[in-house]
Image (cartoon, rainbow, N blue to C red):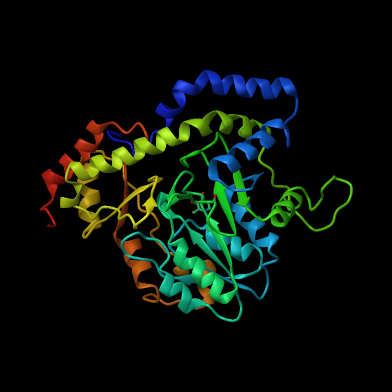
Amino acid sequence: MGVPLMDLRGQWEPLHDRISSAVDEVIRSGVFILGPNVKAFEVETAADLGVAHAVGVANGTDALILALRAYDIGAGDEVICPAYTFFSTPESIGAVGATPVFADIDAGTFQLDPAAVEAAVTERTRAIMAVHLFGHPAPMAELRAIADRHDLILIEDAAQSYGASLNGVRCGAIGDIATFSFFPTKNLGGFGDGGLVTTNNTEIAERIRELRFHGSKDKRTFTQIGMNSRLDELQAAILRVLLPELAGWNDLRQAAAARYAELGLDRFVELPGTAPGADPIYHLYVARCQDRGAVQAALKAAEVGNVVYYDTPHHLQPVFADLGYAVGSLPETERASRECLALPMYPTLPPADQATLVGALEAALVPIA
Ligand SMILES: Cc1ncc(COP(=O)(O)O)c(C=O)c1O
């Protein structure tokens, strides 16, 4: 592949020795589960995000399940979420026995449309699960107002948005509870699976700590049916080396996004929008194409990586067929699924690769505007 969609080796290579030493120290310590690195990482992420509590868990999907369980959300309850997101979002709702209720998105930012969320509230709604999709914050002020009006829990799925902020407040510190993933390709990605739950609610944080450890505080008394879902010590040690580098990496992603605009990419595709007050971190750089097939053909000919996120929205997935959504029921979600295309984005993306991409489109396509 001439121009890869993502290549994170450039961000890790300068840190290789420090990562190896951190791993080595854990091996020498012989402590692999809930040791000093997990504790320190929880303190460091809580301080970094500006939140009272952070709890390390096994992955971002468990983090969502644990967040729902901490609020006793389950059978008979409804949770409003987008259908244009990674599957874990509605999967977690189904996993606790609750029902996902899908709301449409805003065309410009791909985030939940507050008016659609409000229209989806019923007497069974317990929570809104907002997703900060592609590294851009969801409209949290509007969602907070809806949650307050209807007495709902506001959950942030911040898996794709560590480091993004809205009006100066970090994603993960805005709602009642938030979740992160450290899957290797995330902006803060470990060398395996990992996740985090954040909240300012001390009681809920304690509940998450118990739930991640078989529903027990002390391994002797079991107060509830829990899970085995801990961030492991090796991942925490690695993530502690990476965390201080993240702000710089996110700045490089923002610079790469600005460079696409400077190169005139908007002559061929619609660039991702930014909401007022939002400071996105471009986990993915997702453009909208009038003719996606033609854009993909031009990129393929020039060996430029690209991928479609998410081609079948979740309200139309077989697993949710019983919920009765028809084609056309979430028009902006379905349009995004038809038109969107992720283009190369990572901190060390060479400017020459971005120029190659724009040149490939210039050679093959007629400008749209
Ligand atoms: C929006 C979103 N939510 C949840 C998850 C789940 O995270 P994990 O893969 O760590 O379980 C992911 C990523 O994989 C995601 O992109």
Q: Residue at x 64, y 40 (%)?
A: 42
* Left or right: 9 as drawn, with respect to 359: right
* Left or right: 145 as drawn, with respect to 78: left
In the image, residue 225 above or below residue 60: below
Q: Residue at x 40, y 76 (%)?
A: 329
Q: Residue at x 23, y 55 (%)?
A: 270
Quadrant the C terminus occupies: bottom left
Can I make out residue 101 in this image?
no
Residue extending furthest front? 168
Can I make out residue 36 in this image?
yes
Total number of numbered labels?
0
- Judging depth in this view, the residue of 275 and 325 nearest the camera is 275
Quadrant the N terminus occupies: top left
Residue extending furthest right? 220
Give residue 110's position: percent from left, percent from top: 37, 60
Give residue 308's position: percent from left, percent from top: 35, 53
Give residue 312's position: percent from left, percent from top: 41, 62
Give residue 172's position: percent from left, percent from top: 54, 51
On the image, which quarter does residue 2 sit in?
top left
On the image, which quarter does residue 35 sit in?
top right
* Left or right: 2 as drawn, with respect to 369: right
* Left or right: 184 as drawn, with respect to 302: right
Residue extending furthest bottom? 123
Q: Residue at x 46, y 43 (%)?
A: 163
In the image, residue 357 above or below residue 93: above
